[in-house]
Image: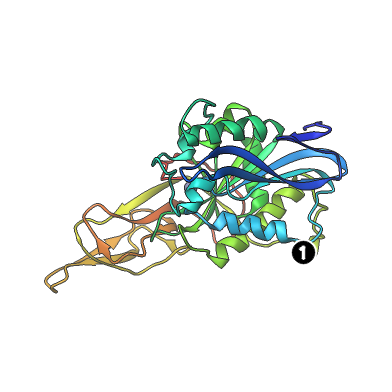
Amino acid sequence: MSQDNPLRVGSVEFLPGQCGVVDLPVGSLTGYQPVTMHVHVRRGRQPGPVLLLTAGLHGDELIGVEILRRLLQTRNLRPIKGTLLVVPVVCMPAFLARSRYLPDRRDLNRLFPGSPEGSLGSRLAHAFVQEIVPHATHSIDFHGGAVGRPNLPQIRVSPGDPIAADLARAFAPPVVIETGLREGSLRAFLKSKDIPSLLFEGGEAFRISKEAVRVGLRGVYGVMRRLGMLPPLKSDEKASAATLFARSTSWVRAPQGGLFIPETDLGKAVQAGTRLGTIADPFGRYETTIHSEVEGLVIGVSREAHADEGDALFHLASLPGRSEEAGPRDEIVEHRDPVE
Ligand SMILES: [Zn+2]
């Protein structure tokens, strides 16, 4: 638990019980505009965990920005102990460009820990690592799916991290997936510093899904309660939603090019042999039915009817032998990591 007292971000110090916003300078753009990072600090009066909440590492993934906006809007939001550090838009240049990437087409989430002499993104990563990360004891980083390929709200955790797995249960998404780490990602950097972290995925780029926002916001409160930053729920208020821990995930790809007509959707359970959809040629000559090869859950789906051979159509979490009253499990997962 961090005992920082006061807690300093940039040139601003926060004492226990204090709240505020720091506009951290991180560089400048071609039009001479300064690039800053808005860091919201909410300190409780008592010492405790420092929960870092981030979104907008990818500038086109807006679900997390909305979740954190809603959180910051909550009246009197201040932990009873510990500190919330909230950065709703980590990569402002990508957010302004309405792009996943920085203006030089780099991906911020491959540039950690960054460098003070590197590219703009590398400097931004460095500033984040220097000014924000050292305070954090736990982290949740919010992401979204690709354009036209929404994700079921889900939490990804690193292998062999029991604290993160416990927080994932407290977040209570429909599904938790253990995934490997990408070099240069924020999650890999946090892991190197032994900071337990959750990665949220939900909805798709450029859009705000109410359901994903609801799950994400509820999840933040669940984690804060688990960390003792908020009082526990009364037993009659406890969520009944069950969280599944997936053993593995796989993509179902178009076996050939054609029109894609789905027959299932996000969150639907599938068995081996379940019809997932059809690929049809545009001239009515042939149709190919796509079947699931696994028992599990649809956690990602393509919304596009154009399909070239090999296009990703469904992302399935494998949950063999899943019972109807699926409670938290300790099963685990090897995962070929999709984009995060
Ligand atoms: Zn992302």
Q: Residue at x 64, y 49 (%)?
A: 169
Residue at coordinates 57% horizontally, 43% vertically from top-left? 34
- Circle 1 sits in a helix, a strand or a loop, which is it? helix
Q: Is residue 58 visible?
A: no
Q: Position of residue 264 (x, y in %)?
A: 39, 67
Quarter of the image that includes the N terminus:
top right
Instruction: Say which of 233 and 293 sits in front.
Output: 233
278 lies above or below 55:
below
The residue under label 1 is 237
Along the line of sight, the residue nearer the viewer: 306 or 102? 102
- Classed neighbour count for the residue bearing mark 1: other residues with Cα under 10 Å, few (<14), some (14–19), many (≥20): few
Disc 1 CB within 8 Å of nearest ligand 1 atom: no
- The quarter holding residue 17 reads top right
- Position of 79 compared to 241: left or right? right
Which residue type does callout 1 highlight? Glu
Question: For this view, does 97 lie left or right of residue 253?
Answer: right
Q: x%, y% of residue 171?
A: 65, 52
Horizontal arrangement in the rendering, residue 57 relative to residue 169 (left or right): left
